[in-house]
Image (cartoon, grey):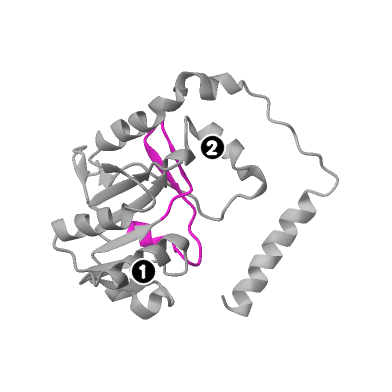
Amino acid sequence: MSMQAMNARERILGKLRSSLQGTSPIVDDYDVDVLTAPWRYAPEARIARLRQMLESVHGETLLTTTAEWPLRAIEALALRNIGELLIAPTTAHGRQFANHVALNAVPLRLKAYDRAVEAWKEELFFRTPASLTGTLGGIAATGSLVLWPTPAEPRLMSLVPPFHIALLKASEVRDNFHELMHEQGWAGAMPTNALLVSGPSKTADIQQTLAYGAHGPKELLVLILQDA
């Protein structure tokens, strides 16, 4: 970020902070049950609900384990004749996958999002067929994945490649959005960009006809890790 842009940002934030001096926050007054009661599920039903909702909008789900998921991901790539994958090698799941590929001599090219987007924009948008990311959890009510982009896994990793493989721990699936936000303390640590992914990309902009894969991933595979 340029010094000029940084100064403008600090000036704006400074004005916002000064405008709050002498004020007190107002506690939200709402009925929690309105946001949660219709969307509660027995613990054993959460995964089934999430899978049903994801698959109803052309998402694909697969139950697996923390030990076996790399093999399931490789099988999915081979089924689609995909020979390269964008991963985050500094994350735990990225290291696990890279080690599995190396130990088993899998003929798969791995690449990392390790430079500014401007330096490889054409390759990212036109020559990166698939990506692998983690998730922060899942929402059973809507069949949604929660992603918080980080420097290790930038936002475009899950938005650009045509085939997105997402890892979701079964133990991190919650009934509804309200429950997940409060449990994870979003009010005190809200990311600058949170993503809710509920299936592959879709749009109804053209003649109100729902079409899939118009922008962003055409396919979404959620590998649900059941160990916990």
Identity of the residue drawn at 26% across and 44% down? 203
First in residue order: circle 2 vs circle 1 = 1
In the image, residue 126 sits, relative to residue 158, either above or below, namely: below
Asked which secondary structure carries label 1, the reply is helix
Q: Callout 2: few (<14), some (14-19), or many (20+) C-alpha neighbours within 10 Å?
A: some
Q: Position of residue 170 (x, y in %)?
A: 42, 40
Residue under the point 46% across and 19% down: 38
Residue at (28% x, 42% y) in the render: 61
Q: Is residue 220 left or right of residue 145?
A: left
Answer with left or right where residue 38 lies relative to residue 19: left
Q: Say above or below: 85 vs 34.
A: below
Q: Nearer the viewer, residue 58 or 19?
A: 58
Check residue 196 for magenta coloring: no
What residue sits right under mark 1 in the picture? 99
Secondary element under disc 2, as helix, strand or loop, is helix
| In the image, residue 145 lies in the stretch drawn in magenta | yes
Dot 2 amino acid type: Leu
Magenta region: 134-159
Q: Label 2: which residue? A: 180
Query: Which of 3/225 is in front?
Result: 225
* Horizontal side of residue 136 vs 157, given as left or right: right
Q: Position of residue 105 (x, y in %)?
A: 24, 72
Closer to viewer: mark 2 or mark 1: 1
Q: In the rendered image, is residue 215 in sight? A: no
Identify residue type, mark 1.
Asn
Q: Quadrant of the N terminus?
A: bottom right
Compute the Cα span from label 2 to label 1: 32 Å
Residue that sits furthest to the right in the current view: 22
Q: In this view of the protein, can residue 103 be seen by the observer?
A: yes
Q: Return the x and y of residue 222 as percentages of the image width and height.
A: 32, 46
Q: Quadrant of residue 18?
A: bottom right
Image quarter for residue 162?
Answer: bottom left
